[in-house]
Image (cartoon, rainbow, N blue to C red):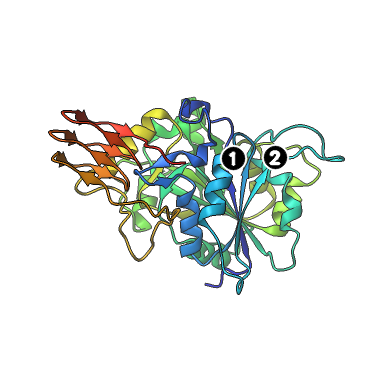
Amino acid sequence: MDMRNTVALILGGGRGTRLFPLTKIRAKPAVPLAAKYRLIDIPISNCINSGINRIYVLTQFLSVSLHQHLRQTYRFDQFNNGFVELLAAQQTVGEGTDWFQGTADAVRKNLRYMDERWVDYILILSGDQLYRMDFADMMKTHIESGAAVTIAGIPVPSGGASALGIMKVNDEGRVIGFVEKPKTEAQLAEVRTDPSWIDAHGIPSEGRDCLASMGLYIFNRDVMVDLLTNTNYEDFGKEVFPAAIKNHHVQLHLFDGYWEDIGTIRAFYECNLSLAKKSPPFDFSDSRAPVYTRARFLPPTVVEGATITGSLIADGCLIGHNTVIENSVIGLRTVIGNNVTIRDAVIMGADY
């Protein structure tokens, strides 16, 4: 699948209040992950591995650390036209003086960067999720179904649906209903999916009876412009998708791999610790689809006489005598003294 006519927009999120204090001095996509990576490395790596090398990152809060990471990490050579560029919120004459009011508003205020003849499709991604996906598969679904909009979705149990955007589809996978974070049983009933439909599409339902949006979307560019121009839609889930379903073909791309939204302190902590397990749910060592990050040229970690089990240890660390580290994630350049015991901990290190 040729992806050269696709541009990716990665949404950097808002203030990141649910991740505070991790977001006290950095944008949400710049939060460290798995000892040596940043959250932003996940969607960018998925793009690169899928053949997409024209990528914008939209943000408006505390973007300095994120900008430094992008500039120092993603440098395409002069013989191709790839780029990873940060688009910070701007107050410009004629476009108002407000900051981004939501996900759709953020895209609307940057549509001018999509006004290129080579852009046929716009891929919208979130900057705070952990997953591995070949977007060429999603594009195949989009093109073969004749869709104007395609939403990646994952089966979830109805008990966890209230925190997600939930879709209703017909037998062909066309989205015919969308409710953002259904709070009542009546709302949930409108979009609940028969588990047999999920089973019939090659994915064991295993008690899952809802199809949740993963926050990954493909739009035909002209449809995106039509939906966002001369409207005041601020949010994709609450406003854009209900409008799109009425007037356009919106298709589901069904996914059943590992996917985790790292939007809260609890999710951040539990996700990091899960990556230190013997059989982690997400494999950073998969050479077929590597996760890229900044090359820091740090010295190897020095262990002077410690007992380390079930843990991730980043480069440049110094670990002292008689120290015990169990089920933990130790970030870059961490110095741990003698006779220290660390269990079930995430230490972010000194990544600067």
Q: Does the CB distance between marks 1 and 2 fall below 8 Å?
A: no
Residue 174 visible in the snapshot: no
Identify the element where label 2 is drawn: loop
Of the numbered discs in the image, which one, if any, rests on residue 328? none
Asked whether 236 or 275 is in front, the reply is 275
At label 1, the amino acid type is Val
Q: In this orientation, which residue lies closer to the viewer: 254 or 122?
A: 122
Q: Give above or below for 78 relative to 16.
A: below
| Residue toward you, 142 or 33 | 33
Comparing marks 1 and 2, which lies closer to the viewer?
1
What's the distance in space between the residues labelled 1 and 2, CA to CA?
13 Å
Q: Residue at x 46, y 30 (%)?
A: 22
Please tell me how many numbered marks the rendered image carries.
2
Quadrant of the rendered image containing residue 142:
bottom right
Tell me if residue 344 comes above or below residue 29 in the rendering: above
Q: Is residue 193 left or right of residue 177?
A: left
* Mark 2, other Cα within 10 Å: few <14 / some 14–19 / many ≥20: some
Decide which of 268, 6 is in the foreground and name it.
268
Label 1 belongs to which residue?
64
| In the rendered image, the vertical position of residue 2 relative to residue 104, given as above or below | below
Q: Where residue 246 appears, x then y in whole percent?
A: 67, 47
The amino acid beneath tag 2 is: Ala
Asked whether the viewer can see residue 334, the reply is yes
Tell me if residue 332 comes above or below residue 138 in the rendering: above
Residue 279 at x, y percent in the picture: 21, 49
Which residue is at a point 37% across and 36% down the rendered structure image? 348
Q: Which residue is mark 2?
A: 89
- Looking at the image, residue 35 sits to the left or right of residue 70; the answer is left
Looking at the rendered structure, the secondary structure element under dot 1 is: helix
In the rendered structure, which disc, 1 or 2, sits on the residue that comes first in sequence? 1
| Residue 4 place in picture, x, y as percent | 60, 69
